Amino acid sequence: MVERAKFKSFQESTKEEWQNIMVCLQDTQAMVANRVIEQLQYLEADHGGFPVNRLEHCLQTASRAERDGRDDEYVLCALLHDIGDNLAPFNHPDIAAGILKPVVSEKNHFMVQHHGIFQGYYFWHYIGLDRNARDKYADSPHYGYTEEFCALYDSPAFDTEYESFDLAHYEPLIREFFKPKGR
């Protein structure tokens, strides 16, 4: 069993306690892949009125990107882009982006973080919102990249007849990206 720190506030902490905490942090990081997979599994029970459940939507998005030859990092982003739907439907892109930020490039992080507003182009006018709200990012070097993600992979991933890869197919990818450093 790992010894726990004794401090009551950070101001009282010691270098030795922080060295121990940093070792424990690697153990916590070792659990992240399992937790990501678990959160994805929760999406299976929720369809939110869409033609497919939220897990199938994520699997379709990733499968489409993979079949199109996108690299592993991009496929991981496609898979996890809606992982926050059950926890925070109105700001789910921020949850996914927060999970992915330590392991992906700036452009893929931007794509995940902003996919919600870019996806709005296809339907926001039906719900009284500005479908062109994404244009506030027109000067971003990642605008076209994110626009393409939504058009090619996210938007069409509601097909009840599409045969996506299953979650087990993506488990090695998840485990590789979220493994602790040096392991």
Image (tube, grey):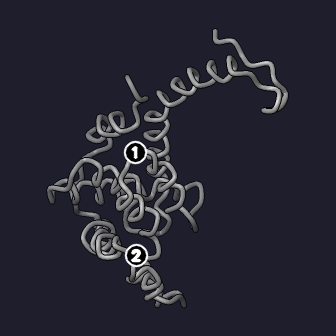
* Residue at image location 59% in from the left, 60% down from the top: 88
Q: Give the vertical position of 80 relative to 169 (above or below).
A: below
Which comes before the other along the chain, label 2 or label 1? 1
- For residue 103, the mark is 1
Q: How crowded is mark 1: few (under 14 residues within 10 Å), some or many (20 or more)?
A: some
* Residue at image location 52% in from the left, 52% down from the top: 98
Mark 2 = which residue?
Answer: 119
Q: Quadrant of the N terminus?
A: top right
Instruction: Judge by depth and name the residue closer to the eye, 38 or 45.
Output: 38
- For residue 42, the mark is none
Query: Percent x, y for residue 38?
Result: 48, 39
10 relative to 60 in the view: left or right: right
Query: Percent x, y for residue 99?
Result: 49, 48
- State the CA–CA distance, disc 2 to disc 1: 23 Å
Residue 115 occupies which quadrant of the picture? bottom left
Instruction: Judge by depth and name the residue closer to the eye, 26 or 160.
Output: 26
- Helix, strand or loop for disc 2: helix
Query: Percent x, y for residue 70?
Result: 20, 56
151 relative to 3 in the view: left or right: left
Query: Percent x, y for residue 171?
Result: 32, 37
| Residue kind at label 1, given as amino acid type | Val
* Residue at image location 27% in from the left, 66% down from the top: 153
* Residue at image location 78% in from the left, 32% down from the top: 10
Instruction: Judge by depth and name the residue closer to the eye, 15 or 121.
Output: 15
Q: Give the vertical position of 152 relative to 177 (above or below).
A: below
Looking at the image, is mark 2 or mark 1 nearer the viewer? 1
- Helix, strand or loop for disc 1: helix
- Outermost residue toward the front in this view: 15
98 relative to 135 in the view: left or right: right
Q: Quadrant of the C terminus?
A: top left
Q: Are marks 2 and 1 in contact (CB under 8 Å)?
A: no
| Residue kind at label 2, given as amino acid type | Gln
